Image: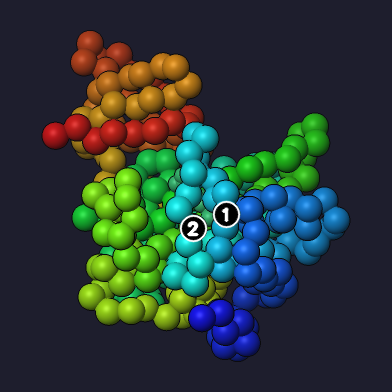
Amino acid sequence: MSLDLRWVEARLDTAFVGRRIVYRQSIPTTQDLARAEAEGGTPEGTAVLAEEQTVGRGRLGRSWVSPAGLNLYLTLVMRPPLERLRYLSMIAPLAAAQAAEEAAGVSPRLKWPNDVLVGGRKLAGVLIETELSGSSVRYALVGIGLNVNLEVERVPGIADIATSLKREAGRPVSREEVLAALLNRFEALYDEGGAVYAAWRSRLETLGRQVRVTFGDQVEEGLAEDVDAEGSLVLRRADGSRVTIAAGDVTLRQ
Ligand code: BTN
């Protein structure tokens, strides 16, 4: 079933996010089409959506499982001022979590930096690719993949680590409802500016936990003590020293 975009448009209360939607049945990845749109000068807030991605991209060179007709795969073209760029990686997972709550009654937590989890399993992921020109942002491509009606048990390799709204809610969930909520929430959070930091921080299940963080070829272990206003993780090592990590991959330790 294709998405009913008219239904979605009728429920948008945004000024610019999702007001232009570029929709395709099957493409390699929405990130690349969004990049072409951004280079062509598409308005801020343009949403590039696909029913299926044949080479969906995840963070850290991973792939993103993107079968047709079940989930949401979208990339938003944003052009924030440089000092607000960092908020995008808080806004995107938070908007996905709020949309899951609104449309399916599911209450996700966040795992630093921007995974959306339910019961420790991944519901949604965020990939942000940024093009800068000197000290200004040409554009940021905010990619969001949200598992709506995916039957995770049927997908080898992710059955134990992923979940979907259908699995959590125990019923099929309308992708249109989730999409409209996601676009509405995204713009509302974007307009809030710095206030998003407190909301993002309060949903982080990472804080107060013993974690292992991998970034590049480095590994740090310790207590995830806090996140700073830049979104970086503040880690307390076993020897009492502190280290601040801007981006990485966290494993929560028991
Ligand atoms: C992650 O958690 O690793 C990030 C996953 C991001 C997936 C989305 S789906 C829409 C957009 N297009 C892609 O190829 N990736 C992002």
**Marks 1/2: CA distance?**
7 Å
Q: Is residue 23 above or below residue 61?
A: below
In the figure, 230 relative to 142: above or below? Answer: above
Numbered disc 2: secondary structure: loop
Q: Which mark is residue 66?
A: 2
Residue 203 appears in the figure = no
Q: Residue type at mark 2? A: Ser
Mark 1 lies within 8 Å of ligand 1 (Cβ measured): no
Specify the quadrant of the image occupied by residue 151: bottom left
Which is nearer the N-term, disc 1 or disc 2? 1
The 10 Å Cα crowd at callout 2, few under 14, some 14 to 19, many 20 or more, is many
Q: Is residue 200 left or right of residue 25?
A: left
Q: Are marks 1 and 2 in contact (CB under 8 Å)?
A: yes
Question: Residue 155: image x %, image y %?
Answer: 34, 55
Query: In which quadrant of the rendered image does the C terminus lie?
Result: top left
Q: Residue at x 26, y 18 (%)?
A: 237
Residue of label 1? 54
* Coloring scheme used: rainbow
